[in-house]
Amino acid sequence: MTASVVLSRREWLLSDRPASRLQARLGRAYVAWRRFSANRLALVGMLIIVALLVVAAFADVLAPYSPTVGDLKNARLLPPGAAHWFGTDDLGRDIYSRVVYGARWTLYVVILVAIIAAPIGLLVGTIAGYAGGWTDTILMRITDIFLAFPKLVLALAFVAALGPGIENAVLAIAITSWPPYARIARAETLTVRNSDYIKAVQLMGASPFRIVLRHIMPLCISSLIIRVTLDMAGIILTAAGLGFLGLGAQPPLPEWGAMIASGRRFILDQWWVAAAPGAAILIVSLGFNLLGDGLRDALDPRSGDQ
Amino acid sequence: MSDTLLEVDDLRVTFPTRTGLVQAVRGVSFSLRRERLGIVGESGSGKSQTGRAIMGVTPPQAEVSAKKLAFDGMDLLSMSPRERRALRGSRIAMILQDPKYSLDPVMTIGRQIVETLRTHEKVSKAEARERALAMLQAVQIRDPARVFDLYPHEVSGGMGQRAMIAMMLVTGPELMIADEPTSALDVTVQLDVLKILDKLVAERGMGLIFISHDLRLVSSFCDRVVVMYAGKVVEQIKASELRDAQHPYTRGLLNCMPRIGFERHPLPVLDRKPEWAA
Amino acid sequence: MSVAENQAAAGRGSARAVAILSSLGRFLVIAVTTYLGLLAVTFFIGRVIPIDPVLAVLGDRAPTAVVERTRREMGLDLPWIEQFYLYVKAALRGDFGTSVLTTNPVMSDIRRVFPATIELATLGTIIGAVIGVPLGVLAAVKRGSLIDQVARIVGLIGYSVPIFWLGLLGLVLFYAKLQWIAFPARLDVVYEYTFTPITGFYLLDAAIQGQWDVFYDAWRHIVLPAALLGYLSLAYISRMIRSFMLNELAQEYIVAARAKGLSERRIIWGHALRNAAVPMVTVIALSYANLLEGSVLTETVFSWPGIGLYITNSLQNADMNAVLGGTIAIGSVFIAINLFSDLLYRLLDPRTKTG
Ligand SMILES: Nc1ncnc2c1ncn2[C@@H]1O[C@H](COP(=O)(O)OP(=O)(O)OP(=O)(O)O)[C@@H](O)[C@H]1O
Ligand SMILES: [Mg+2]
């Protein structure tokens, strides 16, 4: 009984003749999901990211100690043990708790950069692609110029001028990471610009602004999401690098890059101070990379591996 | 027995795919002397895979099996890969469909011909060059020395296919498998290339397997015709007797060919019955 | 053979030369605009963002007289566009101002530190290409096999690991525990005073002068940072080469090569890789550019006296001229590498006809 219900639901999803737009959309999502979930590494990536979200949300519950106030008298630079799983740092703070709270800052950076950079890229790319002509040439020239720059060094220079701090680091990273999104959005726009569908909307008298906003931008979203996910690891690494150089998050914020920087002084004798936050960065970046690869293969079978 | 060049008995080619096993070739049998054999059939009927299995260039994931697959009395399937490779390009050769894709784009035509030769025969560079030039001449390229140094993208499709023929015939093979050698070409040069191929095959007394979906072409060009459908041979017939073909699928293929002067309404549709493939 | 074909082929040599020259011109225009863009961005960072650019350049401890003089020199009372004009003119002369920290002109500082970075990045790229190319080829040829899986994991970790952290762990293991390598620096202190570099590339200089003890010492200092950068470049190169090779191996000319009876070895390395070599050049050049950038973090960890350490030291001391000069230096090399790889691409690919 249940088996037949499940089967028919599956058939409904995979139907060649969807009866409604919703059914078609769900069907497509279902096919993509089946491709995605057949990829074991992609599932691992998703698991890591879900874990990151959970840890960030429940940091208060998961962390046994305060992330900023330590026990200077009794708990300085303790090696990993039962009381302090990842040991303690030079200010007697529990490194495990700091790593747990650090998840929040990692998410903060990644989400803010995505929220700033993706719309800039989307806007520049769709306008360039839709308008064509000189607008296109100039916008794309600027995009290419930014693409040809060394990203990290440019971000460094920006932070040097803006002053250190996590907000400025976010801004600097966002400024240097929008160009690929503009490229993608432009490419997608060019493929649909001359389609009959857009022509029909034009005939109905829609303004260019409305066409770009309502009809072209939504079509760019899925490839943009893939690209942003693939870039997340890079964003995390850049943010951590800025933190490591003392330009990102400032003490006592438990940001992973800054934690490695503070562990650097003791690295030869108390290696654990830097070890745990670095491992956290590695795992989370790996998660985003795996997830991004999986999404790309599932949503864009042309570039697929199998 | 000695004049049988190739013997194929129950040849099968199976591809593993995401949705299960796909049998591209399902028990093909025929034998070949030093004659011209045509293989026809609609797209996807397994003609190319048959040719490639004989050649031994099936994709690695595919499974090839046969009761018998023998060239000049030698069992091809029980040979070591090395022995098989020594046959390829020296005694058995193959021409592919589109010279645009089947010639290495970053190597000059001359070097590609010389490469075939020097893989199979111990000849000096100078001698290899001489023979390559002679071969280019034989496929009626008028200025061989110049074409020798050209890259594939610098010549037309017709000339590219002649270069391909030169590359494959330079070692003097006894069996040639031509997989739609003219379908990618302009109609105006198709005939030229066919004539050259025909002449060389006749002069050298080669066996030829000519794969095509053009029944008329095959019937005028070959001695015998094998008709394939869904990976199986549905009919083997002398080219001269094609008009009296018995099998409904062959008759269907014949009927689909346009003839000048006949008004045809409605257009005939090729009949396909699952039992022919069973 | 048609007449048109004959003529086309006769004009082939000169036509190709013209095509390459014209694309050279186009690339130069792109390089110049990109360089101007780079200057515009650094101008923006140095002059527009700071509330007081003079303080940004001099720090807040400079005497008032110096502040006033610098203000006039920088032309801060002029309109933006004129300031930018002066800025570009100075930059083209190689004048990036004076470093507060070293009190030298920034340009001479950069000349002094750059060879150390080039040496490190070059060695890193060599390591990355020598291992990464064969690894990528093997992964593609034996797709889905153990080596493909290993290559994939190695690559993914290389994409995900914070290099400075890996460097620190490397120091703990190879320097502190195993003592296989020397402490973070470029040479042991003893040699710093006795050794006179010629080119600024210590390995090369030591070899030229036959000072093998210095060579060995320099090697013990460079090997870990170079290996780390090599790992980053390996991760990138092997992944790209794998996908290029998969693409080439699926082409019809590979079937034709098999039909000719060529050995697998010859097909893979002589035909497929020869075709993949065209995009491969770009990938290796890009990887080299990335390593220049990666050197900023690596040099900090290994106290390697190159441009990266110069920039981060200047950052810590709010030495804006030095930071921006270093940024422009690295950016210029980026642009040069891009230009170079585009040209090489065109030279390598016989199909190049028009820009
Ligand atoms: N790599 C592959 N994986 C799975 N199936 C394959 C593969 N290559 C070929 N096939 C299957 O083998 C069948 C026969 O293919 P083949 O190329 O021999 O056809 P053909 O008769 O040459 O057709 P055409 O006239 O189009 O060239 C096809 O239906 C195809 O589905
Ligand atoms: Mg075929």
Image (cartoon, coloured by chain):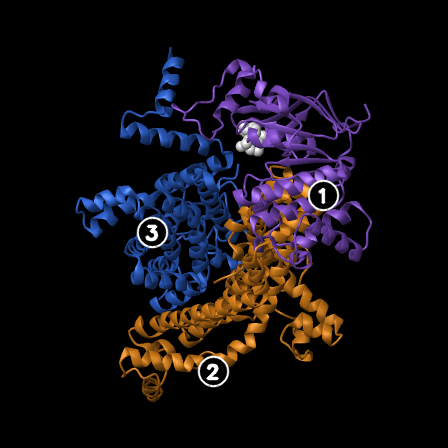
Report the front residue among A257 and A17.
Answer: A17
Label 1: which secondary element: helix
CA gap, disc 3 and disc 1 = 58 Å
Label 3: which secondary element: helix
Q: Are marks 3 and 1 on the same chain?
A: no
Disc 3: CA contacts within 10 A as few (<14), some (14-19) or many (>=20): many
Report the front residue among B47 and C258.
Answer: B47
Please name the residue shown 27% across and 41% down the image.
Answer: A197
Residue A237 in the image, given as x and y percentages of width and height? 46, 54
Q: Give the number of the disc on residue B169.
A: 1
Residue carrying label 3:
A118
Q: Give the number of the disc on residue C268.
A: none
Residue C84 in the image, given as x and y percentages of width and height? 34, 78
Which quarter of the figure has residue B26?
A: top right
Please name the residue shown 74% across and 35% down the image.
Answer: B206
Residue C250 makes an appearance in the image: no
- In the picture, one chain is blue; tell me its letter: A
For the C terminus of chain B, the quadrant is top right
Label 2: which secondary element: loop
| Left or right of A198 in this view: A224 | right
Q: Give the number of the disc on residue C105.
A: 2
Which quarter of the figure has residue A266?
A: bottom right
Question: Which quarter of the frame holds ligand 2?
Answer: top right
- In the picture, one chain is orange; tell me its letter: C
* Tag 1 near tag 2, CB within 8 Å: no
* Tag 3 near tag 1, CB within 8 Å: no
Q: Amino acid at mark 3?
A: Ala
Report in which chain the residue with disc 2 lies: C
Please name the residue shown 44% across and 43% down the image.
Answer: A292
Q: Judge depth for marks 2 and 3 and give the one in front.
A: 3
User: Outermost residue toward the top?
Assistant: A1
